[in-house]
Amino acid sequence: MALSSDPPSVPFSPPAPPDPAALPLPSPSRPAAGVRLLRAAVYRLLEGRRPLELDVWLPEDTGTHVPLVVFVHGGGWHTGLRDNMGPRLHSWQPGPFARLVRAGFAVACLDYRLSGEAHFPAQRDDVAAALRWLNTRAEELGVDASRTVLWGESAGAHLAALAALSARAEGIAPVRGCVCWYVPSDLGALAEDHGGRYDALDPGTYEARLLGAPAGADPERARAASPVAHVTAQAPPFLLLHGTADTAVPTRQSVRLADALREAGVPVELRLVEGAQHLWMGVPDEQVIDCFERSVEFTRARTR
């Protein structure tokens, strides 16, 4: 009998992805005087998914480790760019992140999986992974990760708040504070807060796309994804800013989170911006600048 000379087949096993904590950092660019930008550093690799990246904005080498702002972008959890703080700030020269660097901070702006890619809690887990990566590489970056403040707007404020409130439970070093611009804080209460202009059973809402089911059809899942449900006495201080004319995320959502934090004995400052719509539309530039500067002052006070 003739014997086959073909070698035995070996099942293909794809190589394990590299550890993002061991990947080289990007080469810096200099988008503004005194500012270094490390663009598109990979902080998380998930099988079958796009690499998740973040940008790190840093001062020129000062010889000291600077406090860190971690910014989470908005966009209804289904769109958005990591370096976008909102349309009212697009024309700023220098931009908001360069201004934060000049104010003495490093800034990390991160991607996360959008609702078309994965449902909650994937987005919260991505923010947690970014915080772990930043803690691991803090010495290399020249940042003091023990002085971190989270900052988000709209859907990003929701994720920043969740990350700030769940850091201890996730085994992450606690952050010093959290800045939330027009935050969705209680997904199960949106119908009430919208005054009947929101269908909690509509599968096409931003929240339903995030959760994988309408909030009204799965109240337990909506509760688990709501920052108000995770407030404890160990929460860091919060600064909440919200426009009184916001029809996308009702002002009551920030009020609910402020009430929960106060009830738990957590320091919280709630500022309602008269006449402001979502994304700070409808108010003069001076009020947008004031919201930014108040957020910077809160961050500075929390990271001294």
Image (tube, grey):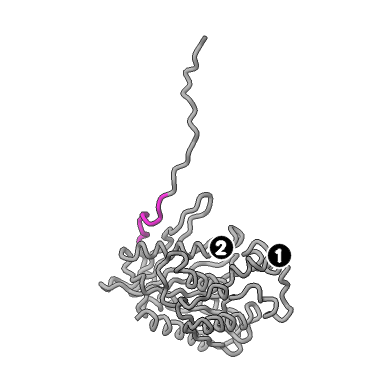
Residue type, mark 2 in image? Pro
The residue under the point 50% across, 67% down is: 82
Residue 38's disc number: none
Residue 56: percent from the left, percent from the top?
A: 40, 67
At mark 1, the secondary structure is loop
Looking at the image, which residue sits at the far bottom?
274
Q: Which residue is mark 1?
A: 203
Relative depth, front residue between 4 and 275:
4
Query: How many numbered discs sit on the rendered protein?
Result: 2
Looking at the image, which residue sits at the far top?
1
> First in sequence: mark 1 or mark 2?
2
Q: Which residue is mark 2?
A: 121
Q: Please say if 272 is above or below 172.
A: below
Q: Is most of the magenta stretch helix, strand or loop?
A: loop
The residue under the point 35% across, 62% down is: 137
Q: Is residue 152 visible?
A: yes
Whether residue 22 appears in magenta in the rendering, the answer is: yes
Whether residue 99 appears in magenta in the rendering, the answer is: no
Q: Give the image quarter of residue 206.
A: bottom right
Q: Which residues are magenta?
A: 18-27
Residue type, mark 1 in image? Pro
Residue 141: percent from the left, percent from the top?
A: 33, 65
Q: Quarter holding the C terminus?
A: bottom left
Residue 108: percent from the left, percent from the top?
A: 42, 69
Relative depth, front residue between 250 and 61:
250
Q: Is residue 259 left or right of residue 18?
A: right
The residue under the point 45% across, 85% down is: 293
Q: Is residue 31 left or right of residue 181?
A: left
Q: Is residue 32 visible?
A: no
